[in-house]
Image (cartoon, rainbow, N blue to C red):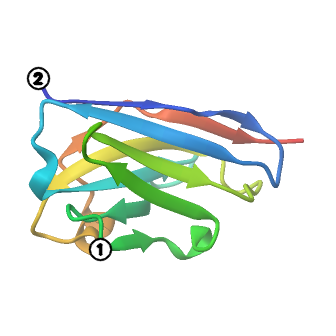
Amino acid sequence: QKQLVESGGGLVQPGGSLTLSCEISGFTLDYYNLGWFRQAPGKEREGVSCISSSGRTTTYTDSVKGRFTISRDKAKNTVYLQMDSLKPEDPAVYYCATGQEPPDCRWYFDNGMDYWGKGTLVNVSS
């Protein structure tokens, strides 16, 4: 059974940090991109970050560049999103997702991925 389970969301003050984790099962991830998307209330879902199957290529939306870092641990079938310097515009439900290569992460940013987790809520407030 294919499953993606996010954890690590919560409430943090502006400027703070959170690390999201997504444990993936039921896949052989050798040929899958792994991504993080988010959706804030009243807004469309957007791609936040994506990492290629090899881990050599990462993609970020402009608003999080320099603040967020995506990584993957193949042995643990887990993808992480380290979020630093969190801003008031970052709150959303963050979703882990995966899609087979090809296509590449940029295509998935625009079109969404094939498999999704249920999401974890991130709030930024003082």
Above or below: residue 102 compared with residue 45: below
Mark 1: amino acid: Arg
Residue sitting at 70 percent across and 39 percent down? Answer: 123
Residue sitting at 37 percent across and 30 percent down? Answer: 118
Residue sitting at 35 percent across and 51 percent down? Answer: 72
Residue sitting at 52 percent across and 61 percent down? Answer: 69
Q: Residues within 10 Å of mark 2 (few under 14, many from 20)?
A: few
For the question of whether residue 70 can be seen, the reply is yes
Depth order, front residue of 97/44: 97
Q: Secondary structure at mark 2?
A: loop
Label 2 to label 1: alpha-carbon separation? 27 Å
Above or below: residue 10 compared with residue 79: above
Q: Secondary structure at mark 1?
A: helix
Q: Residue 48 in the image: state x and y as whole percent.
A: 47, 61
Mark 2: amino acid: Gln
Q: Residue 14 in the image: state x and y as whole percent.
A: 83, 51
Residue at the spot of label 1: 106
Q: Are marks 2 and 1 in contact (CB under 8 Å)?
A: no
Depth order, front residue of 58/116: 58
Residue at the spot of label 2: 1
For the question of whether residue 47 can be seen, the reply is no
Q: Residue 83 in the image: state x and y as whole percent.
A: 62, 53
Q: Which quarter of the figure has residue 49?
A: bottom left
